[in-house]
């Protein structure tokens, strides 16, 4: 099984977001990552098993993301996250907007704290999710995207495509669920994003 790759850029972003990069076990450092690790004082720590009921997570996918959704759902449940599955529930062809909207509404109304939505590329589901007032969805393709979306944008819905290595996706999901919003100057910017929901309802 391939080990997740940690790059120098991942280390640099972790330094900006609390100085700790969480992993789920063995990992590989890219050339240059070890040097950045020492210079920036970032710590790599194994993620602790969360307590039961730590976080309610909505998951959803279309038929293209169905298998990956199932793997992530089982994995998150084994770590005692409370996972709410909003479909689809088979490989039969379906329309991603239906399921992305359901999971996103669950986040917007407070049923779940975060949402993870999967389709072939993650793009369409991100567009759908961001139509739901109160949702800040981020389509991520790297650990840099994952950490930035939480630290700077306070993303509450993550959308993913299916073309990445499974171990990388598992690591990204955990990093995203663990990461905190940095606040500070970003608070003002996120507030401006949220205000656009009100403009759209006028």
Image (spheres, rainbow, N blue to C red):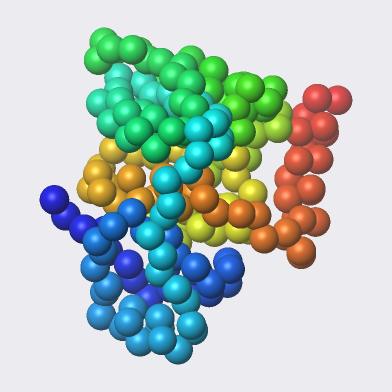
In the displayed structure, does residue 152 sit left or right of residue 11? right
Spot occupied by residue 126 in the image (x, y as percentages of width and height): 50, 35
Spot occupied by residue 192 in the image (x, y as percentages of width and height): 79, 48
So how many labels did they put on this image? Answer: 0
Up/down of 57 relative to 11, above or below: above
Up/down of 82 relative to 1, above or below: above
Q: Looking at the image, can residue 122 be seen?
A: no
Rendering quarter of residue 188: bottom right
Spot occupied by residue 138 in the image (x, y as percentages of width and height): 53, 44
Up/down of 101 relative to 2, above or below: above
Residue sitting farthest toward the front: 51
Q: Residue at x 39, y 30 (%)?
A: 77
In the displayed structure, does residue 188 sit left or right of residue 77? right
Residue sitting farthest toward the left: 1
Up/down of 119 relative to 47, above or below: above
Rendering quarter of residue 143: bottom left
The front one of 95 and 144 is 144
The front one of 176 and 160 is 176
Q: Looking at the image, can residue 52 be seen?
A: yes
Q: Residue at x 79, y 48 (%)?
A: 191
Quadrant (top left/top right/bottom left/bottom right) for the C terminus: top right
Rendering quarter of residue 128: top right
Q: Residue at x 25, y 49 (%)?
A: 167
The front one of 69 and 48 is 48
Q: Residue at x 48, y 21 (%)?
A: 84
């Amino acid at each position: 099984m391939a080990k997740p790759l940690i790059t120098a850029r991942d280390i640099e972003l972790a330094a900006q977001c609390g100085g700790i990069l969480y992993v789920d076990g063995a990992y590989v450092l890219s050339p240059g990552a070890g040097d950045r690790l020492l210079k920036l004082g970032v710590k790599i720590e194994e993620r602790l098993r969360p307590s039961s009921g730590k976080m309610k997570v909505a998951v959803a996918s279309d038929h293209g993301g169905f298998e990956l959704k199932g793997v992530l759902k089982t994995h998150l449940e084994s770590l005692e996250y409370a996972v709410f599955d909003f479909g689809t529930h088979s490989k039969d062809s379906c329309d991603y907007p239906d399921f992305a909207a359901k999971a996103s509404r669950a986040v917007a109304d407070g049923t779940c704290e975060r949402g993870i939505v999967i389709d072939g590329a993650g793009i369409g589901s991100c567009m759908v999710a961001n139509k739901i007032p109160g949702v800040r969805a981020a389509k991520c393709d790297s650990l840099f995207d994952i950490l930035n979306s939480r630290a700077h944008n306070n993303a509450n819905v993550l959308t993913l495509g299916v073309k990445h290595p499974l171990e990388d996706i598992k690591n990204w999901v955990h990093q995203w669920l663990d990461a905190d919003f940095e606040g500070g100057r970003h608070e003002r910017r996120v507030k401006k994003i949220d205000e656009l929901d009100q403009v759209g309802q006028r």
